Amino acid sequence: MIHVIFKELKELARDGRFKIVIGISLILLVIATITGVNQYQKNNEQYINSVAKERSIWETQGAKNPHSAAHYGTYAFKPQFALSLFDYGVTKYTGNSIFLEAHSRNEASFSEASDQTSLARFGTLSINFVLIYLFPLIIILIGYNSYTKEKEHQTFRLLKSQGVHPVKLALGKWFAIYIPIFCLTLIVFLLLGIVLSNLENLAFFSWNSLLILFVLYALYYLIVTTLTVLISMWSKSSGMSLVSSLVIWILFSFISPKVATNFANKNNPYPSKSEFNTRIAEDKKNGLDGHNPWNKAAKKLEEETLKEYGVDSISQLPFNYAGYRMQKGEEHEAKIYEKHYAILNDIAIQQNSTYKKLAFLSPFIPVRFLSMDIANTSDNLHWKFTKAAEEYRIKKQAFLNNDIKDNSKLGDWNYKMSAQRFKELPKFSFTPPKLSNLLTENKESLVFLGFWLLLPFITMIWASKKI
Amino acid sequence: MFKNNLKYEIKLLIRSHWLTILLVSVLLLFTFATFNGQKNVEKRLSDITKVENELHKKDSVMVTTLKKIEKGEKIDGPYWRLPSEPMTIGYRHPRLAIMKPETFSFLATGQSDMYTHFKSPTVYGNNFALDYSEMVNPVQLLFGNFDLAFVIIYILPLLIIAFTFNVLSKEKELGTLRLLSAQPISTVNWVLQKMLIRYIVFTGVILLILLTMFAVFSKGIFSDIGTLAGLLIIISGYILFWFVLSCIVNIKLNNSSKNALALIGFWLLIVLVLPATINQLGSTLYPTPSRLKMINEIRLIKKENEEKQNEIMSEYLRNHPELAQESNQDKFGFWHNYFASEKVMEEKTKPLLAQYETQLRKQQKLVSVFQFLSPAILMQQSLNKIAGTSENHYNDYKKQVFEFSNEWRNYLVPMLFKQQKFTIKNYNELPQFSYKNRVPNKIWFSIGVILLISCIIFFAFIGGSLRDKSVQKLLN
């Protein structure tokens, strides 16, 4: 088998086309890395500045009524994760800041894509772009004629007559195709790791994530390699083999994801923003359960509070009831938002599961999802971020409302919270999920990948004996 | 000779099953794509109907209350909720500014999946910095839609490549090239004739299927014959470009697998790598300032504004003396203050927001230069423009909504300051928004460009071979 591998590799090394293709890919990788690093540093710097500036705006607003401050609000910014320069994922489409104000939960606004031309829809050149679209093509280029050339040069009979075991021959050719791409990928990831670890202010970089990404792509290339060899085995001519492999590649990387989009959209359509807001407004008006609006609930709350403290008017309560009621109202509204965002999140999960289920059509899909997730640029992460921001918003509201409750008198709307106290609000911080959690969340994709690894491989071994 | 060639070529195509494969695959792809495009348009329309119904419901309640007020009946609820107050109408009952799909919208999703198609600008609030993004799963935006534009831009070239990559090299590999060169026609001419025949057959099939699809799914577009003709011609032009490219590769390389590889390489370059690289270059060369920075700056302006509010108000009143009616100054102090500070906010943020537009325009300029390099970009831009889903359309829609928001404000604010009540009569003459497609699609220019590109590369690479009658080069 070793001989087969050496023979194939030598042939490859002498092939001019291989060199050109590798050269072009490397140039693209270099461009992608330079622009990626540039963009990352700029965005990260902007992120750090914005967080600091926004915090200082918050802290220096001077003595103010807490509720005015709540309306003035503050922002939660999404950190720029280190691996986002490897895989941009959906970050371009999600926006990375959320306005946190009283009474309403806001969406992340200003996606990058809306500030770009529609060219962005072709995709953006990134390291991941080269790895996920172009590297499989290199594999096809190396391997499409691995069997057909023996048939066309009539050397296949010769090989057989020499007593080479067909499985060994298949494995030899398989390794010979995979080794160059494996080495290339290894180098790319190593260099990437070195570049990344030399950057300043890197947020949440871990070699482990990079390693898992490397394994992921290496596995994807294994699948593509197996399929390429298999197709070459079954094809009559090199031309046919090349065309078939390319059809598979296009099916994997372009057609299936797009078809999945249409399925996902048809089965679980998103409401429009205005429809979503109308539903929330309706619940706000009629109450969460449809017959218990906030003004009714508020009355009940008042009665209960009075009873609890054994007094008969709110002015006798040991705290400012206005602040207390405001906080309860906020919590009431927050629950309405939670309900509707949970419904929305459910639609998103359903849609993504449609995508992931269609992984049986294309191993590209699980790889794409896993890659985004590990790079912290997936919509899964974006949901986690928006949830964290909402939790922080509720905490912030409680901080301000409790100040009214504890420090002001009923009816005193001119009350001002001291300038100093604004500094006591804890800062917003967001930590991405752990790698192990991410992998458990993506169990389904991993299983599909496993199937894609095994089935074609077994078929290849079986088919190698038949020809 | 041409007749002979034509006869045998067609026989060959029919017997090799190529025509059947082509027909079936194109039919499948086009049906699915048109169906999807139509579904997207339907979803857009149904979303629009939903908000319209919602508005009608709200309006009918409002009108009933107005009638009661006009009859002098007493209405419960606080004063600021009464529809007889112009500001209540202005803020709580805004009109819908709807962007209806165009006849050709099913053709290309373009940017339509990212943006909303209805907005209700209110009498106060930041109308100049509205967020137009629609609620959507970002994964969908990442993967994109399977629409006709995708099939035309990405898949058609691949079909062409598969259809033509070995027109000449096959003869060489079968050993029939020598026989051919003994015929009374130059081999290059023979290849060109063969390609021309294939081009006509291919384009014919595509256009026929396309027209059938339109007839089945979207009859409306036959009313706009001019654009339809332009669309069909530009698709033919795009197909021509790929045929020319294939011709060149056939004649220059003349080896089946090398041909296929070279053509796939060109496809990758034109459809995938160039657009992605140009997009990356565009945003590196003309980066839009960070939105985070904008948020910071707007917040600072807001903060400053609050501090200076009194000062601002008197300045504003100086500019609008008609609003400062002496007796009501106290009562309307709040509104004066509000509109004044909003006006200042608007003035101050204008240069900030203008930066985004300028940078986007520069990026667009870059794209329009590079579309000469990659016909795929040219096609995407043209199809989006025909479909009314290009970024230009959405930018213009934003402008129209902003213009409308001014109209809305100018109708209601004077009523407030003149102490007029809002009546049924006012309701019937409220300003209405109607979206106008003001973006020219420049389709004939694009057709010109694509034909020009095809001609230039044709003569630059095959011009020499046309004169050179020897086949020696081809045989080697």
Image: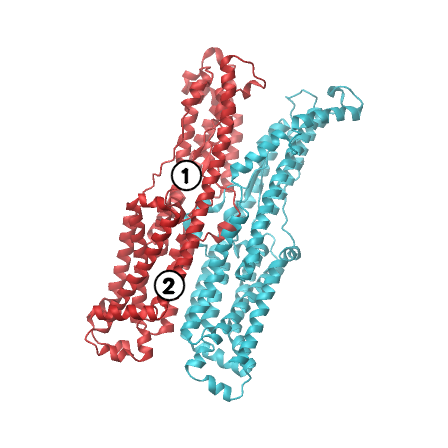
Q: Is disc 2 surrounded by few (<14), some (14 to 19) or many (20+) residues within 10 Å?
A: some
- Badge 1: chain ID: B
Percent position (x, y) of residue B245?
31, 64
Mark closer to the observer (1, 2): 2
Side (left or right) of A159 relative to A210: left
The answer to whether residue B372 shows anywhere in this view is no
Frontmost residue, A319 versus B113? B113
Q: Residue furthest bottom?
A: A162
Q: Which residue lies at the image location 48% right of the left edge and 72% below the top edge?
A: A231
Q: Residue type at mark 2?
A: Leu
Chain A's colour is: cyan
Residue contact between numbered discs 1 and 2, judged by CB atoms under 8 Å? no
Residue type marked 1 = Lys
Same-subunit check for callouts 1 and 2: yes
Question: Which residue does the numbered mark 2 point to in the structure image?
Answer: B22
Direction from residue B186 to residue B39 in the image, left or right? right
On screen, residue A167 above or below B135:
below
Q: Is residue B375 left or right of residue A101?
A: left
The dot on residue B100 is: 1
